[in-house]
Amino acid sequence: MNTVIALWMRGLKAFVRNKTGLIFSLIFPFFFVYVFGAIFKNDYIDNPISYMLSGVIITTVFESSLNLASSTVDDMVSGFMKEVLVSPAKRLAVAVGQLLSAATVSTLQGILILFIGLFIGIKFTTWITPVLILFAMICVGMVFSGVGLFLATKVRSGQTFQIIKTAVTMPLTFLSGAYIPLAMLPNLLKYIAYVNPMTYATAFFRMIVLEKTSLTNAELVKEGLAIDINGFIVTPVLSLIIILLIGLVFIILSTNSFVKTDFSRLNRSSNDASALWG
């Protein structure tokens, strides 16, 4: 438990000390609100700003949880991870500490954007909504922290990891309905969006933020809060179940991969992109 807490606190301290990164992580999301906000102005959406911000917040949590996995790669290459593992600390505890650190920091970034959003359009009518929002952000943070840690254990170069991370985050973000409604996508991209886990995370999170839990399935589909896959309606609750199942799979995969990784094969000069996977 001490190992988990130590690594968790280390991640939080690094987040607080990186003031420049923190400032840009708060400013950049509102650029998307400004650019894409007009897209959501239609008859079915009462509050376009809240609609857009909800997508921006959850994608920020997603991207941050993956970004923080790059610090795990740096720890591996720099030798820090080997130093930790020669101590009595168990590998499973180290993996859990890394996961909790990434999930916590990504959730904090989401909370900060949400707080700013309260001054520009987001409104809640019940105290239960913020609690559910926090729950959703923690879930998404943990899920994609697991994905990030799994990738980190398979990549031996920080430079390579950044390339892979960009290749993963860009399509998953823009094909999730967070910035561009799924109804506006070409049919081929719609089917790609249907297998995108962020599509379901966005739909569930957006329903909570907009407090649309009482809508019918047809109304949820019209507002982009449920996904209609050839007549089969994926409701926000079903979306949550899908996300949790994906998270369970990747948390198991990432911890198992971390435990089995041979850190003695990693060194400071390990920067060749060919050292990917293995």
Image (cartoon, grey):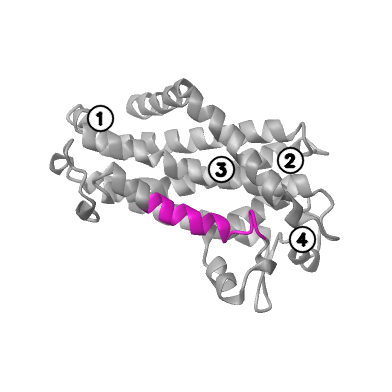
Residue drawn at point x = 35 percent, y = 24 percent: 2
**Which residue is denoted by mark 2 in the rendering?**
129
Q: Which residues are magenta?
A: 164-180
**Which residue is denoted by mark 1 in the rendering?**
89
Mark 4–mark 1 CB contact (< 8 Å): no
**Secondary element at tag 3:** helix
Q: Position of residue 13 (x, y in %)?
A: 43, 22
Pick the quarter of the image with the C terminus. Answer: bottom left
Residue 172: within the magenta? yes
Q: Looking at this rendering, what residue extends furthest in the bottom direction?
A: 230
Q: Amino acid at mark 4?
A: Glu
Number of residues whose C-alpha sits closer than 10 Å to that of mark 4, classed few (under 14), some (14–19) or many (20 or more): many
**Which residue is denoted by mark 3 in the rendering?**
60
Mark 4 / mark 1, whichever is N-terminal: 1
Residue drawn at point x = 56 percent, y = 43 percent: 60
Total numbered labels placed on residues in the image: 4
Mark 4–mark 2 CB contact (< 8 Å): no
Q: Amino acid at mark 2?
A: Thr
Mark 2 / mark 1, whichever is N-terminal: 1
- For marks 2 and 3, give the CA distance: 19 Å
**Which residue is denoted by mark 4 in the rendering?**
223
Label 3 vs label 1, nearer the camera: 3
Mark 3 / mark 1, whichever is N-terminal: 3
